[in-house]
Every structure is written in C-alpha cells, then in structure tokens.
Image: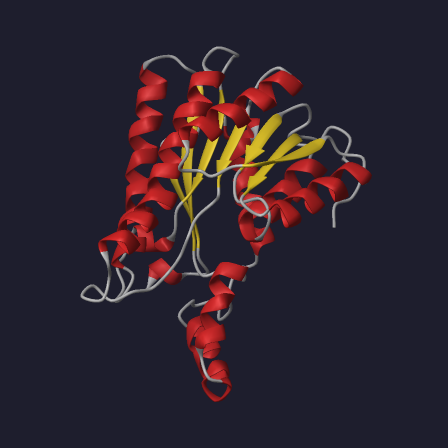
Amino acid sequence: MAQESQKNGRLEGKIALITGAASGIGRATAERFAREGAKVALTDIDPDKGGKLAEELTKAGHDAFYQNLDVVDPDEWHAVVEAVTNRWGQLDILVNSAGIGRAKGLLDMSFDFWRQTISINLDGTFLGTQAAVDSMKDTGGGAIVNISSVLGFVGMSNISAYAASKGGVRLFTKAAAIECANKGYNVRVNSVHPGYIETPMVMRRFDKIAAAEREAEETRLKKSHPLGRLGKPEEIASMILYLASDEAAFVTGAEFVADGGYLAQ
C-alpha cells in the first residue's frame, strides 16, 4: 500500500486525474503518483473499491479523492474535471486507463458488443483527452497518457473489437499530440502499450476455463512473452510515471511498449 510522499518526488505538486483507478494498472498508477508527490483524483465505476483506495491514500498522508465517472458520458467528464479544478486550481496530468477487454468471434459478435467495446476504450479516451486539453490549455499545459495495448499493433483471433479500439487509441493519441503542439497548448499526449498484465481484467479469462486446463493456459500465455511471465501493474505504472513527469518534456505523440518482448517476435 501507499507509503508517505517522497520529498521532492517526481510529481511533486502536480495534479493528476486517473480513470479506472479502482484496480489494475489504474490503481497501481494512483498509488505510485501519490508516492511521487502528486495530488490524485481517482475515478472509476466501482465506488466501493475506488472510495476505499482514496481513503487509504488520505490516511497515508496523500491528497486524494474519489469520484464516479462513466467515461462515455461527456457530462460526467465535465463534472470531474470541474471538481479537480475547483479543489486544486488546475489539472496537470490525465491517465486514461479505464477499459474493457472481452473476446468474441467475428461472426458471433453482436453490434452492441462491438459498440460497447469501442465506446469504452476509444470514445472514453477521446472524451477524456478533449476535456483535459480544454482545461490544461488555459493553465500552462499538461501531460496525457492513454493506455492502449500490444493489440493496438497486431491482431488476434476473437478480439477484433478490442484490437480496433486499441489501435484507434494509438493513432488518436498521435493526432491529438500533433494538434496540441501545433496550436501551442503545451499539452503532451502519449500512449502506453502493455502486454498481458496481472490485472483482474486479464486474470478473469481463466475463470471460464476448467481447472484441469487452467495451468496449461496460464503457461501458454506466459510463454507468449519472451521474458516468460506476465507483467505487473506496477511495472506499467513506472512507464506512465515517466511520461507524466517533466522528465518526458520533449516526448509527445509517441508509443511506449512494455510487453516482455511480445511484439519483438
């Protein structure tokens, strides 16, 4: 759990908003940002887990709060950015980590399934980026980190909707970064592309597998990464931290892969 804020942390005095903060990569990022001195707004659609994390961070001496956010609702985005700026004066960092990952064959997929996947993963990233840039451009700029996937580069059977959404995040990030630079907003926008990470979303795939087959499937998934294991949320949080910090002041429109060698094969 969170430790006391570091003196002169890498995000000291920065104000961050993180979606999908109740679990997985979002949670690990929130905890890391707080330890690095950031004030952190946590958002999710799980008020129990999100609220509990905010309480834990506060008790550990960090400045944090939780607010529910449906990332496909423009009004809720407006409300949460307004809550951040009312509380702390501005928004410096946005991490678009909320997402959904489900498998469905091309011929078995309903249009609603397709639209929900695209909506949460891609529309949610667009709405968050739009809301953050609109705020950041008037307060000196900021940094946005969009969480994509290795499957934003390559395809795989039964995940066409997910791959399309994450590929969209990858190129949307580049276009948004160029526009922000050209218009002088001083907002950097980058994407992170994890391999398979030990998050609840990834590990749920094993719940549907018979116990006798689970170990073999876990082994297969681990071996699909040359390093021979799944990644840890904290490892992705470290990359997000770099992109959110002033250390990455000359980095925008870039894609950062953390995949244990998955894409190098």
Q: Horizontal and vertical percent for residue 91?
A: 56, 22
Residue under the image location 34 percent in, 34 percent down: 173
Residue under the image location 65 percent in, 42 percent down: 32
When the figure is inspected, residue 35 is found, relative to residue 232, above or below; the finding is: above
Residue at the left extreme of this rendering: 107
Image mark count: 0
For the C terminus, which image quadrant? bottom left
When the figure is inspected, residue 37 is found, relative to residue 136, above or below; the finding is: below
Relative placement, left or right, of 105 versus 205 is left
Q: Nearer the viewer, residue 20 or 242?
A: 20
Q: Is residue 188 visible?
A: yes
When the figure is inspected, residue 155 is found, relative to residue 189, above or below; the finding is: below
Q: Horizontal and vertical percent for residue 19?
A: 52, 39
Q: Quadrant of residue 180?
A: top left
Q: Nearer the viewer, residue 175 or 110?
A: 110
Q: Horizontal and vertical percent for residue 105?
A: 24, 67
Q: Is residue 254 visible?
A: no
When the figure is inspected, residue 128 is found, relative to residue 240, above or below; the finding is: above
Coloring scheme used: secondary structure
Q: Nearer the viewer, residue 169 or 59?
A: 59
Q: Horizontal and vertical percent for residue 82?
A: 55, 20
Residue under the image location 44 percent in, 38 percent down: 71
Relative placement, left or right, of 247 versus 163 is right
